[in-house]
Image: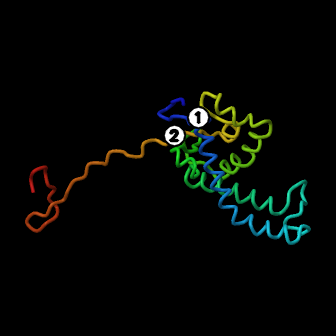
Amino acid sequence: MQNNNDRTYAGFFVRLAAYIVDITLVSLMLLIIKTPFWIISLASPDNFLVKDFIFQYSVMDIVLYLLKVTYFILLTYYTGSTLGKKLFRIEVISSENRKLTFFEVAYRETVGKFLSAVIIYIGYIMAGLDEEKKGLHDILSDTRVVYKQNEKQPLPQQNIVCPQNGTEEHVCESGNN
């Protein structure tokens, strides 16, 4: 973990743990979709839904991939983190600390992660070696994974309006009502 500009970068192992939580949740959710496809494949192995048509992929494979990647894209775009990342209190931010665009998130979660995995997952291993804990997908999309900052901040002082003589315009001093 490194600290730069009051941000602590999330290292390789915490990111891996968050991913394991996420992929477990996604796999359990996709069982709802996989079960009917499995039944279709048993009943009719030549059905176009389960038969390979693009390289070694079927309609079922494509649908499952799109649902999986939709989970990662939508949660990261709208909340800055997936459920696994939330569990470990980490989030994805842009290097300029602004809200990520939908394109940046989609690129990071699809092309970036594909390229990170191409050669023996070296793009992911880079997160353990880089000073800012960036994987290849972070470098390509200019993002960082950091620990969430403490969300508890002091409340601003408020004036308490107290009724005096039938009006509510008098501000109470401490000890005076």
Q: Pick the residue in front: 90 or 56.
A: 56
Q: Secondary structure at mark 2?
A: strand
88, above or below 160, in the image: above
Q: Earlier in the sequence, mark 2 or mark 1?
A: 1
Q: Secondary structure at mark 1?
A: loop
1, above or below 20, in the image: above
Q: Amino acid at mark 1?
A: Gly
Quadrant including the C terminus: bottom left
Q: Pick the residue in front: 40 or 126.
A: 40
Badge 2: few (under 14), some or many (20 or more) residues near its Cα, within 10 Å? Answer: many
Residue sitting at x 76%, y 69%: 36
Which residue in the protein does label 1 denote? 11
Q: Position of residue 170 (x, y in %)?
A: 14, 59
The residues tagged by marks 2 and 1 sit, at their Cα atoms, a distance apart of 10 Å
Q: Pick the residue in front: 106 or 32.
A: 32
Q: Pick the residue in front: 12 or 146.
A: 12
Q: Amino acid at mark 2?
A: Tyr
Residue sitting at x 72%, y 44%: 113
Quadrant including the N terminus: top right
Q: How is the image coloured?
A: rainbow
Residue 147 numbered mark, or none: 2
145, above or below 132, in the image: below
Say if mark 2 contacts mark 1, CB within 8 Å.
no
Q: Position of residue 111 (x, y in %)?
A: 75, 46
Q: Position of residue 133 (x, y in %)?
A: 61, 33
149, above or below 164, in the image: above
Q: Position of residue 107 (x, y in %)?
A: 71, 48
Name the quadrant containing residue 30: bottom right
